[in-house]
Amino acid sequence: MADEEISEKEVLPEGRTRVRLDFAPEAVERLEQLKTASGAESNARVIANALRFYEWYLKTVADGGTIRIQKGEELAGIEFDWSE
C-alpha cells in the first residue's frame, strides 16, 4: 500500500475538490471489492466512508476506547496495524 499517493488536486464548483489517487493494482482491486460489497455508487463514496471510519477509530482510541467485535456469544477486542 505504500505505492498510493495523491498526485493532483483540482478545485471544482460547489466547494468540491477532485483528487487523483495513484493506487497499486492490489489496492484498486480492494477498492473495487469494497465498492461491490458495500453497494457504494462510486469509488469516491467508498473512500469517503473509509475516511469516516478511520477518523472515528482514531478518535475512539485516542480517547482511551477500545474496539470490540461480537459474533454470537464471542467477544473479541481488535487492533489495527495501520503501518502498511
Image: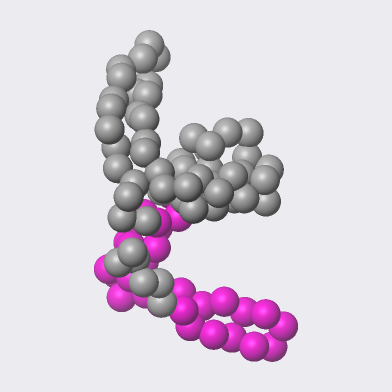
- Give the image location of residue 6, x and y in percent: 29, 37
Number of marks in the rendered image:
0
Determine the residue positioned at 27% across, 33% down: 7
| Residue 14 appears anywhere in the view | yes
75 vs 40, nearest the viewer: 40
Q: Is residue 32 left or right of residue 81?
A: right
Determine the residue positioned at 40% across, 44% down: 23
Q: Which quadrant, please, contains the C terminus?
A: bottom left
Quadrant assignment, res 21:
top left
Quadrant assignment, res 42:
top right
Q: Magenta stretch: residue 54 in it?
A: yes
- The single residue placed furthest to the right in the displayed view is 72
What segment is highlighted magenta in the picture? 52-78
Q: Which quadrant, please, contains the N terminus?
A: bottom left
- The single residue placed furthest to the front in the displayed view is 25
- Give the image location of residue 26, x and y in percent: 49, 53
41 vs 2, nearest the viewer: 2
Determine the residue positioned at 46% across, 79% down: 78
- Give the image location of residue 25, x and y in percent: 47, 47
- Give the image location of residue 13, x and y in percent: 38, 11
39 vs 84, nearest the viewer: 84
- Colour scheme of the picture: one colour
Q: Magenta stretch: residue 6 in it?
A: no
Q: 70 above or below 83? A: below
Q: 18 above or below 1? A: above
Q: 49 above or below 62? A: above
Quadrant assignment, res 82:
bottom left
Determine the residue positioned at 34% across, 47% down: 4
| Residue 38 appears anywhere in the view | no
